[in-house]
Image: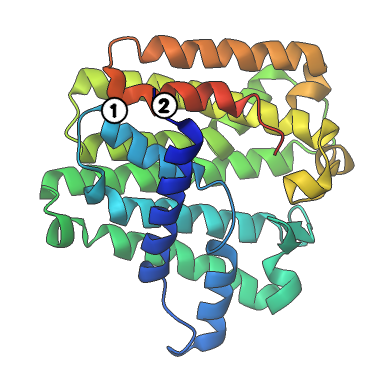
Amino acid sequence: MRDFKQYWATRLEQIEEILEAALPTENVTPGRLHEAMRYSTLGGGKRLRALLVMAACEAVGGDISRTANLVAAVEMVHAYSLIHDDLPCMDDDDLRRGKPTNHRVYGEAMAVLAGDALLTEAFAELAKMSEQYGVAPETAVRVVAELAQGAGSQGMVGGQVVDILGQEQEPDRSTLDYIHRHKTGALITAALRGGALIGGCTEGELAQITIYGENFGLAFQITDDILDETGQTAQLGKAVGADQRLGKQTFPRLYGLEKSKQMARESVAKCHAALEGFSNEAWFLRELATFIIQRDH
């Protein structure tokens, strides 16, 4: 029996080491920018997207050491998205991962630039895959395309736009699905698909990993919506009630808490079904799907 918590803790240490090495240090000009980048990327968070990269690679029998560049890249993209999401022109949040948000520490202009730099640095990391870890060039190109699509206008950024435009409007299922599948789910799915591709997956395995990712992302975001209403600031590391304050489209707002919980459970069941043909190497993905709706932060 493998230890879920110990596996996560071990991978977290590896991920922090990868990020520490990948990010420019404060003693490199412009130091203030690099300090802001590191402030929001290092030392906090669940590292969920990086974990999914590693776990997907492992699930298809791959060598997770070859995922280091993608691990760094997805966390940089995620950190940039959080920095921008917290800005006054968007969610206007003061707390993230239990500490003041980037713009509260470094100012709005530096926060914008730190996010921009993290996004750019992410793709610089991916450019090193073939040279550093021997990832086949054709695979590397596919991984770059996965991250670009997952993070761009047809992915995370597109979901953020619809999220903003949907504020103060009556919630409806099609808009809600679009927001959650793009703002959150697209980057999660890209992380999984990228990890599986580096691991040498078959097209059939990639298709099942994609189904897992889409349903995992939905379950994760539904649970986030629920925690925004029922959670505690100290546990979440960010202010609760923000969705209601901004009039956001959420599952609890449309369906109520109990129905939302049921829908999250149904999504997790689909995650498990997607992995039925995989070996025991997919154990962490299976347990993670169950955990994600049981969490309190």
Name the mark on residue 49: none
Name the mark on residue 285: 2
The residue under the point 81% across, 39% down is 243
Q: Position of residue 64 (x, y in %)?
A: 26, 44
186 relative position to 40: left or right: left
38 relative position to 3: left or right: right
Q: Position of residue 296 (x, y in %)?
A: 72, 34
274 relative position to 34: left or right: left
Q: Position of residue 135 (x, y in %)?
A: 14, 49
Mark 2 closeness class: few <14, some 14–19, many ≥20 residues within 10 Å: many
Secondary structure of the residue carrying tag 1 is helix
Query: In front here: 4 or 91?
Result: 4
Residue 20, picture quadrant: bottom left
Question: According to the image, what is the colour scheme of the structure?
Answer: rainbow
Instruction: Please tell me which of labels 1 and 2 falls first in the chain.
Output: 1
The residue under the point 33% across, 24% down is 282
Q: Quadrant of the N terminus?
A: top left
The residue under the point 53% across, 43% down is 156
Q: Quadrant of the C terminus?
A: top right
Mark 1 closeness class: few <14, some 14–19, many ≥20 residues within 10 Å: many
Residue 150, picture quadrant: top left
Name the mark on residue 59: 1
Query: In front here: 158 or 245?
Result: 245
The residue under the point 74% across, 51% down is 237
Residue 83, picture quadrant: bottom right
Secondary structure of the residue carrying tag 2 is helix
Pointer 1 and pointer 2: residues touching (CB < 8 Å)?
yes
Amino acid at circle 1: Ala
Q: Quick check: 240 above or below 131?
A: above
Q: Position of residue 73 (x, y in %)?
A: 38, 56
